[in-house]
Image (cartoon, grey):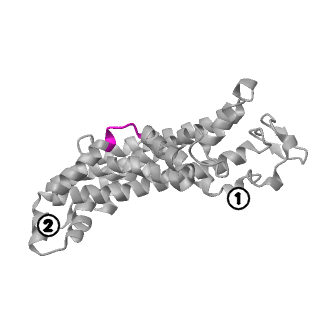
Amino acid sequence: MSAKRVIGGESTVGRALRGIAASRKASFAGAICLILILAAISAPVIAPQDPYDLTEIDFFDSRLPPWSESRDGLIYVLGTDTQGRDMFSAMLYGLRTSLAVGVTAGVLALLIGTALGLVAAYLGGRWDNFIMRFVDLMLGFPTILVALMILVIFGQGTWKVILALVFVQWAYFARAVRGTALVEAAKDYVEAARCLGLSTSRILFGHLLPNCLPPLIVIGTIQVASAIAAEATLSFLGIGLPITEPSLGLLIANGYQVLLAGLYWMSIYPGLLLLVLVFSINIVGDRLREVLNPRLAT
């Protein structure tokens, strides 16, 4: 029996898309996610200014409230920050950075966790015990605490943040894949593949992996949102991304310092954008869990 006769990659993705479209709340959240992703990608085109180009920033325009006009005639729809940067432009670039960090960390964690989970389920024995005990150890500590300790040791940097998030997230994928792969490994089509002399890698990635896609899609969506929120938390604490590569967390942190002075727009607007982004991704992930989990499907 071929793995393609179970739940293949295309049918799983198609069922997920149909499930999202069938829910008004999930489709609305998915549309918001798509708009935000397109806005982040198009930031250099649609942003009124490059907020990190010193030649485009005028310090005399700092701390302007929303809908203020600059000396050059530029309308600051969301106001400016303490450095005179356009908040709307800064939020677009910050959104771009946050999405890039979250998606990259989620994809890398998915690849590592999936590979280890498949190996643990298929080989069993000592490999299974060693990998799963390490997974239990990783899941026993708060995610943000472990990432915080890693960045305190190695310092700031975009790739350091990404690797720290990968280190604390891969265990979620490994556990989910291992549980699904254990069930699939006991079925006849896997035994038939062994009898045919197929290589271990072909059995793992050609037969077991396609049947592990439903939980992977769900967990991957949720972990991307978790990575975005974790990165924002680390950057807010001042140990995440450097100032030269700001994210939504850094914008919130900068605005928080002057919040009591009445300059609410510097932290409230980036905070709302981060909330909408994470909340929308979680709604889509929750809908995918309902659609792709046979126990929850109606």
Alpha carbons under labels 1 and 2: distance apart: 51 Å
Residue 24 in view (yes/no):
no
Q: Is 141 included in the stretch rendered in magenta?
A: yes
Q: Residue at x 17, y 74 (%)?
A: 198
- In the rendered view, would you say 36 is above or below 141? below
Q: Residues within 10 Å of mark 2 (few under 14, many from 20)?
A: few
Residue 279 place in picture, x, y as percent: 49, 38
Residue 5 place in picture, x, y as percent: 21, 64
Q: Residue at x 70, y 58 (%)?
A: 45
Residue 45 shows which numbered tag?
A: 1
Q: Is 91 included in the stretch rendered in magenta?
A: no
Q: Residue at x 29, y 51 (%)?
A: 174
Quarter of the image for residue 85 reads top right
Which label's residue is closer to the chain start, 1 or 2?
2
Quadrant, the N terminus: bottom left
What is the three-letter code of the residue carrying label 2? Met
- In the rendered view, would you say 18 is above or below 229? below
Residue position for label 2: 1
Q: Nearer the viewer, residue 226 or 126?
A: 126
User: Which residue sits furthest right?
Assistant: 71
Residue 286 in view (yes/no):
yes
Are the residues at dot 1 and dot 2 in contact (C-beta closer than 8 Å)? no
Q: Where are the magenta residues, as a range?
A: 138-143
